[in-house]
Amino acid sequence: MHQWKYLKWFVEQIESLFNYRKRTQAMPKNRYVDFISDKDFLECVNGVCKSYASSVGGKVDLERLMRNTVDPFKVLFDTHNLKISLEKWIINERMRQEDKTINNEIGYFHQKLLGKVDGWKNLGTGDESNVDLKKEDNSVFIELKNKYNTMNSDATKECRQKLERIISKYPEATAYWAFIISKTGTSGETVWAKGGFQTKDNLRKIWGKKVYELVTGDPDAMEKTWRALPKALDDILKSKTGNDKREQKEILKFFKSAFER
């Protein structure tokens, strides 16, 4: 009798596994990443693409360009030494002036994308916590920056105070200062020790690939995102403007240098 019950249980487990495989095989795989939908991924990528729209193509607004006082000596040095036309220089200068806007949008790309992961929320602006991301159960809060040097000393102090207020309100929560690009080209996590503040285990600093791992649970999530970008960009821009295989290998060195030194 005991053997029959065991055999029945074993058969049920096999059937359950078989049915699970049938269901998962029938489910369409995501085209880009496996932790948010294709629609959400394209929405995040398109937000950055739109910030390039005013920088690439179209008529150059010289009046707007010169509002920032262009150095006429640099115009001459650049066009002669770089052997480029004035038109090409103007395009480059417009890109340079608008680079901050693009970098800000790339930072928001990470925030929007991670906020679309199940169980997480992009807080945008106006939330009482004044941070960027949180777990919906209020167990984790994140102030996210794109680069380690985005904040000056006053802004860093303000960030620390903001996170202190959060863990005071939610003592069981963990609050993070997070940034994607570190000075050392590494990924990691540690307690955030800062002069003038008491060190607390639930007030931490996290950077690089560890940020994506914290939110998704997948240590490869950031690299998956990065590798999916060319496909998404081609789909959005409706053209095959990407890099050839040789360039892809060279660009991979940038990724390794930024996160895996």
Image (cartoon, helix red, strand yellow):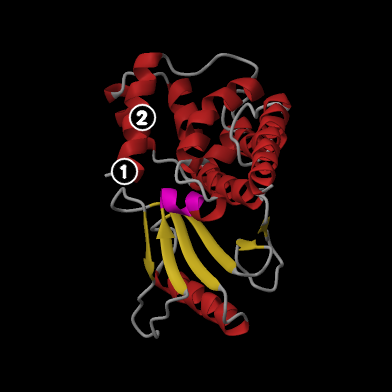
Dominant secondary structure of the residues highlighted in magenta in the image: helix
Percent coordinates x, y for residue 41 in the rendering: 65, 36
109 w.r.t. 248: above or below:
below
Q: Indicate the amino acid at tag 1.
A: Glu
Q: Image point 32% across, 18% down: which residue?
A: 83
189 w.r.t. 28: above or below:
below
> Which secondary structure lies at badge 1?
loop
For residue 73, say whether it is visible: no
45 w.r.t. 200: above or below:
above
Percent coordinates x, y for residue 199 in the rendering: 38, 81
Residue in front for this viewpoint, 186 or 195: 186
For residue 57, say whether it is visible: yes
Within-10-Å neighbours for mark 1: few <14, some 14–19, many 20+: some
Q: Image point 57% across, 74% down: which residue?
A: 173
Q: Which residue is mark 1?
A: 260
89 w.r.t. 194: above or below:
above
Percent coordinates x, y for residue 54 in the rendering: 62, 33
**Is residue 54 covered in magenta?**
no
- The C terminus lies in which quarter of the figure? top left
Q: CA distance from mark 1 to mark 2?
A: 11 Å
Residue in front for this viewpoint, 41 or 103: 41
What residue range appears in magenta?
A: 208-213
Q: Indicate the amino acid at tag 2.
A: Leu
Sequence-first tag of 1 and 2: 2
> Which secondary structure lies at badge 2?
helix
Q: Which mark is residue 252?
A: 2
Q: Image point 31% across, 23% down: which residue?
A: 82
How many numbered discs sit on the rendered protein?
2
Q: Is residue 80 left or right of residue 104?
A: left
Q: Is residue 229 left or right of residue 70?
A: right
Residue in front for this viewpoint, 70 or 238: 238
Q: Image point 52% across, 70% down: which residue?
A: 175
